[in-house]
Image (tube, rainbow, N blue to C red):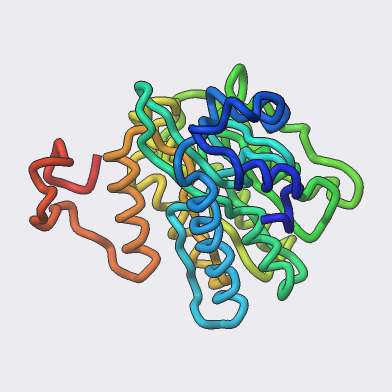
């Protein structure tokens, strides 16, 4: 993890626990750990386990052992080099608190996965369809042309407040960040008419050796924090389209605060990635009557 994050920050994450957090009052402020990014038991262990998913996925793609790698526990994009941000502890490491209950824990992964890709590929493309701007990933590669970041996100009085159309980064990285700010309520057709031409142009011009696709589920209709109006199939169309280029792709999760919609969508997208389009009816399972409010995948 110290390939990207500072030693001091990672050392803090390794040591802090709910029992000793009072001893780290100074570090809590310095590393932005607190309300949005709470400390809980097993924080560091889960960081390491989850980060390994994206790093190993990228490594297997590099070695030609697969064409697509998936880590739904990855894809968190707000953490900075030396601080947590927006539920993200290490770039991609995430904890969501909804109704004061911790409901989901994810991973340290995106930047580390891209760094793994860069060992074998001259250029890597990062695509982000989370409702929030992928600020942490953009910042990590702010001054290089070896990584191009493309983010489609809600903009305007919305966290993290970055990703304006004219944000094109600096130095050697200038023009290698593409930001497409969007307003509330965008639907499947409008999103497709934006996403496909932009990604097609980027692929033709940049010609990446590998792709990282962040599939945040908070861009889905009905999300508790998001404001877009994408259906499951509208969201999945992005996955289908990117896969169609035939370039090695690492597919990651991300945000998503209406869990039943996120679960359905990522299950459906997993099917697309392995060449199987799932039907609408859910097979019977032990959680059939407990965890679902409908009997179908779609919503």
Left-right relation of 243 to 208: left
- Which residue is more in the foreground, 171 or 21? 21
* Quadrant location of the C terminus in the rendered image: top left
User: Looking at the picture, does residue 127 appear above or below residue 209?
Assistant: above
Q: Residue furthest top?
A: 157
| Image location of residue 9, percent across then percent down | 70, 42
* Quadrant location of the N terminus in the rendered image: bottom right
For the image, the number of numbered tags is 0
User: Looking at the picture, does residue 34 appear above or below residue 203?
Assistant: above
The residue located at (72%, 55%) in the rendering is 2
Left-right relation of 291 to 107: left
- Which residue is more in the foreground, 9 or 88? 9
In this view of the protein, can residue 164 be seen by the observer? no
The residue located at (59%, 58%) in the rendering is 212
| Image location of residue 125, percent across then percent down | 66, 58
| Image location of residue 223, percent across then percent down | 37, 30
The residue located at (49%, 33%) in the rendering is 18
Quarter assignment of residue 60: bottom right
| Image location of residue 143, percent across then percent down | 85, 49
The residue located at (71%, 75%) in the rendering is 120
Quarter assignment of residue 61: bottom right
- Which residue is more in the foreground, 110 or 206? 110
In this view of the protein, can residue 54 be seen by the observer? yes
């Amino acid at each position: 993890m110290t390939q990207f994050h500072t030693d001091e920050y990672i050392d803090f994450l390794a040591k802090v626990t709910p029992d000793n957090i009072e001893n780290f009052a100074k570090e809590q402020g310095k590393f932005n750990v607190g309300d949005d990014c709470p400390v809980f038991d097993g924080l560091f262990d889960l960081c390491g386990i989850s980060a390994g998913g994206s790093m190993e996925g990228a490594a297997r793609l590099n070695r030609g052992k697969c064409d697509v790698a998936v880590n739904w526990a990855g894809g968190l994009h707000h953490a900075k080099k030396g601080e947590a941000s927006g539920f993200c502890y290490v770039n991609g490491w995430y904890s969501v608190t909804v109704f004061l209950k911790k409901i989901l824990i994810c991973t340290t992964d995106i930047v580390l996965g891209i760094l793994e890709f860069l060992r074998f590929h001259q250029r890597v493309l990062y695509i982000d369809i989370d409702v929030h701007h992928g600020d942490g990933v953009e910042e990590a590669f702010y001054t290089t042309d070896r990584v191009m970041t493309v983010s489609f996100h809600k903009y305007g009085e919305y966290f993290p407040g970055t990703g304006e159309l004219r944000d094109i980064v600096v130095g050697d990285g200038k023009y290698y960040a593409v930001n497409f700010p969007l307003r509330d309520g965008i639907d499947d057709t409008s999103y497709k008419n934006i996403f496909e031409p932009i990604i097609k142009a980027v692929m033709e011009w940049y010609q990446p050796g590998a792709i990282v696709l962040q599939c945040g589920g908070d861009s889905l209709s009905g999300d508790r924090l998001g404001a877009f109006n994408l259906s499951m199939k509208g969201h999945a169309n992005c996955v289908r389209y990117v896969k169609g280029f035939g370039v090695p792709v690492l597919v990651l999760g991300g945000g998503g605060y209406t869990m039943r919609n996120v679960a359905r969508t990522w299950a459906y997208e997993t099917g697309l990635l392995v060449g199987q389009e799932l039907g609408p009816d859910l097979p019977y399972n032990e959680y059939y009557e407990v965890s679902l409010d409908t009997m179908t995948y779609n919503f």
